[in-house]
Amino acid sequence: MGKGKYFILCKFDLVFIFASFERQRMTFDEIKAHLRGKTVGIAGCGGLGSNCAVALARVGVGTLVLADYDVIIISNLNRQYFFLDQVGMLKTEALEINIGRINPDVKVILHNVMLTPENIPAIFKDCDVIIEAFDLADQKQMLIETVLSVFQEKYLVLGLGMAGWGLSNELMVRASDKMYICGDGVSEISSDHPPLAPRVGIVANQQANVALEILLK
Amino acid sequence: MKVLLNNRVEEIEREEISVSELLSLKNYTFKLLIVKINGHLVKRDEYGGTFIHEGDDVMVLHLISGG
């Protein structure tokens, strides 16, 4: 009797577990068909932006709007999706080439400008999701304030807190209305606490994962 | 009054409080913040003139560099 009860409990547990994972399922062809008509904006093509853009390109997001004014320097290569022979190139242009080598079906729109409250509305107006992928806190604030003011209906995915190494389980995703916050929220970069490929890559891919969750809804 | 601050209930001994006062009361010393009340953005230059009331849902996010 006791044994039977235990078995039933186990069975209920399994049913519950399966139910909680039984969300959307699609084949990769269905996913690609769904994503083909979608547009994601990437504000900043550094550690977060370059890795997030590549992840979204691999799964087949139709259009990526890439904005950055910076050129690649050698110290970027510890985390950004660029190659040694691309040092000196504009990040947007190098990223377009790298995306093209992975998935040439992705339409890439480049904006080689510094983003400001004045140009953000026009640059990202057609995006379903905007990825905040800046380095500096004051730029993050400018982008978030601008997006929340002019695009209340758009989804915004932030990267916040990813310096150093280890502590993988501190990197998480929190939601506040249509704004999602990826990262640990506390690890700020400094000379002895640099951003490095593993944690920056985790957060960049969390951002891509949130974007997918939104786009495939 | 009771308000929700970053999903935690906070008791504040006031009828209403400005965003600036709340930030200093709760020792938010970071200069770069995003503040939302009931889902609506409060911009930097509006902190002094925007008031929080009983039951409001306040989100304060401090921004740090890295990316």
Image (cartoon, helix red, strand yellow):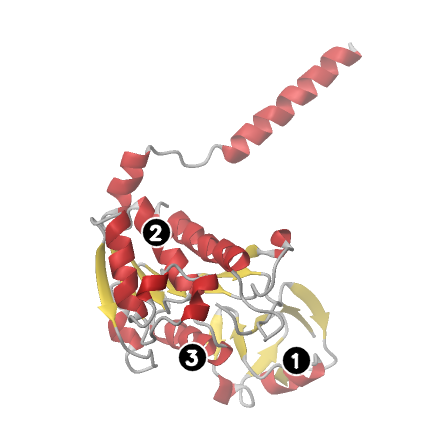
Q: What residue is shown with label 1?
A: B28
Q: Answer few, some or many: residues within 10 Å of disc 3's Cα (few below 14, many 20 plus, some between 14 and 19).
A: some
Say which amino acid is labelled 1. Tyr
Q: What residue is shown with label 2?
A: A56
Q: Nearer the viewer, mark 2 or mark 1?
A: 2
Between A90 and B39, which is closer to the camera in this rendering?
A: A90
> Which badge, 3 or 2, is on the more N-terminal residue?
2
Please name the residue shown 57% across and 25% down the image.
Answer: A15
Q: CA distance from mark 2 to mark 1?
A: 36 Å
To which quarter of the image does residue A10 belong? top right
Q: With A52 as the anchor, is A203 left or right in this view?
A: right
The chain containing the residue under callout 3 comes to A
* Res B32 seen here: yes
Q: Residue furthest front?
A: A85
The chain containing the residue under callout 2 comes to A
Residue A144: percent from left, percent from top: 43, 73
Q: Determine if marks 2 and 1 fall on one subunit.
A: no
